[in-house]
Amino acid sequence: MKHILVVDDHKDVRDLIALILDGAEDYQVAKVECGEKAVEISKKKRLDLVIMDVVMPEGIDGYSATKSIKQHSINQELKIIMVTAMGHDMDIRQGIKAGADAYIVKPFSPVELIDKVDRMLKSLE
Amino acid sequence: MKTYKEKNAGISVKRLIQQFFIFYIPLLFLVGVILSFFYYSDAKIVKTAIKKHQESDVAIKVKSITSDVKSVVSDLNFISRQHGLIQLVDKDERLDKYDLECDFLKLAEEKENYDQIRIIDTDGMEIIRVNYNNGNPVIVPDEKLQSKKHRYYFKETFALNEGEVYISPLDLNVENNLIELPYKPVIRLGTPVFDSMGEKRGVVVLNYLAGKLIDNFVALCSKDDDVALLNSEGYWLYSLGENDRFGFMFADNKNLTFAKRYPEAWKVIVDSGSGQIDNNDGIFTFSKVYPFRGIERGRVGGASTEKGVDRYVWIVVSKIVPNKLNQQIAVIFKKYIDIYFVITIFLALVAWMCAKISLREKMATNSLCRSEENLDGIIKSIADGIIVTDHDNNVLFMNPAAENIFGVSSEHVIGIPVDVAIREAMLGQRVNDTLAKKQPGYQFDFTVDDPNGNKPKIMHAHTSVIHDRKGRERGIVTIINDVTQEREAVRVKTEFLSTAAHELRSPLTSIRGFSEILLTRDNLKPEKRKEFLQYVNEQSVSLCGIINDLLDISRIEYGSGFSFNKGVCDIKKCVLDVVSRFKNNDEIHTFILEIPEEKIELYVDNDKFVQLLNNLLSNAVKYSPEGGAISLSVSRNEQGGSFTIKDEGLGMTPDQLKNVFEKFYRAGSSSHNIEGTGLGMTIVKYIVEAHDGEITIESEPGKGTEIVVAIPYKPSEEAEQEG
């Protein structure tokens, strides 16, 4: 059982990602609406993958959250996929620099997301 | 080649003539002065030549007179010592008187000088007399001989000692007390005769025909020469005017003297042997003649002279009247006037050409100055900064705009390397590179600190190489303009597009995701399927809302703006309509409406006012997710109307409140799952401001938010237009 945390300020996107992943593999999906909560969770609970939104109006943004999770997570092998509407090369580079392992640009296809998540988690095994 | 008209285009005739005279008059004056100098020296030379000529003329005449007189004296001496004559006075019987008379006759014939040759005895009786008889000499017979006892020449001569000579003044011959006609000027020369025993026995008297002497004198004169021969008293012995001659001989003409006519000249003549006098009467050249100075042992006597040959004086005077001199000078003057005339014509041509050239040059200079001034004015007025640097990157020129940009004064930076002068590394480097790399030019941005302490300004620079006519590189011209606003506009636009794209991607993610799930998963329960479709529908509605809001914002921010269709509008009706729509679609909120009875008319755009109310009420609804009262109170005042919307919802922190009008800002939306574009309040603020209104928000987390919008009856602009 893999633990996945979805971080996005839009409820529908959170629900969608959870739905896509629920139906696919043996994943346990949790959802939070801001970066701070994600960082807190990663410190307490073993997470395998975080799907992180970049632009969130409340609190820290996705880059800071990614950096913080990578530093403080109890699972140092944890993978982070950035899911964002910011699709510029510059944004992607910034995400990778912050510690993201993969990058998905909104609007994405569920198949693409599942594919990326599967590959990412399989690389951990 | 230019035509004459083109060359002289723009030169006015008046100015040309003025310029002509500016050149011509000094030239005329200069040439006049030079020619005057030559004229005066020429005139002086002529005058001097005339004087010299006169001097030599007078000298010749003096010589002629002296020479004529000399032979007379020798003749006299010869006769007085002649042997025959001695015999005669000795009363020697061997003497044949006739022989002696024949000798005298021969002498008179040969010499042609002697009117009479006489021997007078001690009693004054003529013993022998030979008359020249105008070229036919005759011996006067004894019976016709006369006594000359009482004549002055006999008395004077008889009183003399041996070897002494009496010379009478030159006068006219008088016969029988009448002046002989035609006038016969004579000088009587006499000397006593002594016998062999040394006894004085009589006198020899020669009547010398001075007319011949005068004729010889006159022969040396040309027709017009005004030459005179004067005696020591200033009477004319010879003069051009016949009536002036021998004035002393005529009772009526005693006053006809040179001394009386030319007293000034006479004064000088009396005191000098020779010389020249230049006065108003003319130029007088004179020389005294001592005709008998050659007589070594003689004494001279005469009516008017004392004894002594030096007292026997004549004066040769040559006179040039002013007119005659002036005539000669006038010839020179005319010559110079002719030369001057020719030169003036030539000078006129020269002056005309000079005037034209000078005016053309002046005009060219003026036009150059004007165009330089214009160019200078243009360059100084250009709002873009201009820096010109030379081959070594030293600043050659900096216009006022560039001075402002860099906060330096051009007078302090000219001649200094550009990177030192303006301390702008990028600019200095690029200017260096432009020449070094031989690039035609660079375009680049750089920032400069704002002297007022505002945000740094963004400058755009464009360097270009300056080439001279031969294509050689001479330096760099760098044009700098302030692009802060343009760059800011681009930045805002890019940011807006980026944010807009971001906002569109979120609902699209749901639409795409859920629709794909619906399409790919057949085993979905009907309620799930409905739920997902609900998501798709909601997100597409949201998408529409975002797009509409984005378009509004885009219009607001990029100039086209909303087009406000303002008019007098009953606010009460609008409020009632909007609130009733909200009431009908909402079950968890209580809407409390406080509104006056009467109409509230404001000068607003009805649709925009409705949009404003909608945005505010929908925010009140969205941010009171738990329900509660939403009150809307409308009131009238003197300025216009105001309405207050109050909810009991989530409220905002001070930070959230600060960002409430920012685009796409949605306070607490993530934590409370509140939908929206984040553009509603931005639009509200814009609509309020467009009506010259004010919006104030008070909010406290957990207690709700109160928004007051005050709108004047008429915004100032419209009031002014109508007023």
Image (cartoon, coloured by chain):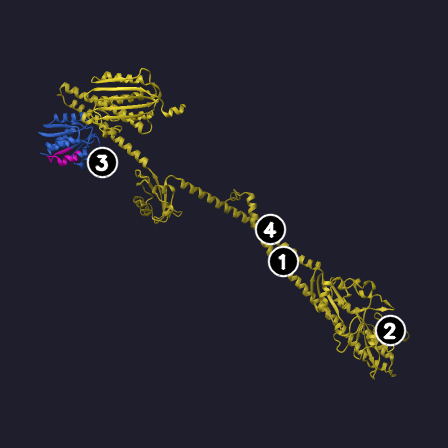
Chain colours: A blue, B yellow
At a point 14% along the width and 22% down the height, the residue shown is B521
* Front one among A59 and B424: A59
Reading the image, the residue beneath label 4 is B345
Name the amino acid, label 4. Answer: Ile
Name the amino acid, label 1. Answer: Tyr
Q: Position of residue A70 (x, y in %)?
A: 14, 36
Please tell me whether residue B258 belongs to the stretch shown in magenta: no
Tell me how far mark 4 sits from mark 1, CA to CA: 19 Å
Asked whether the viewer can see residue B576, the reply is yes
Q: Position of residue B174 (x, y in %)?
A: 85, 68
The local crowd at label 2, few if under 14, some if 14 to 19, many if 20 or more residues have their Cα within 10 Å, is few
Reading the image, the residue beneath label 2 is B150
Q: Is residue B214 above or below residue A12?
A: below
Secondary structure of the residue carrying tag 3 is helix
- The segment highlighted magenta reads A65-80
Reading the image, the residue beneath label 1 is B39
Q: Is residue B636 left or right of residue B116?
A: left
Secondary structure of the residue carrying tag 4 is helix
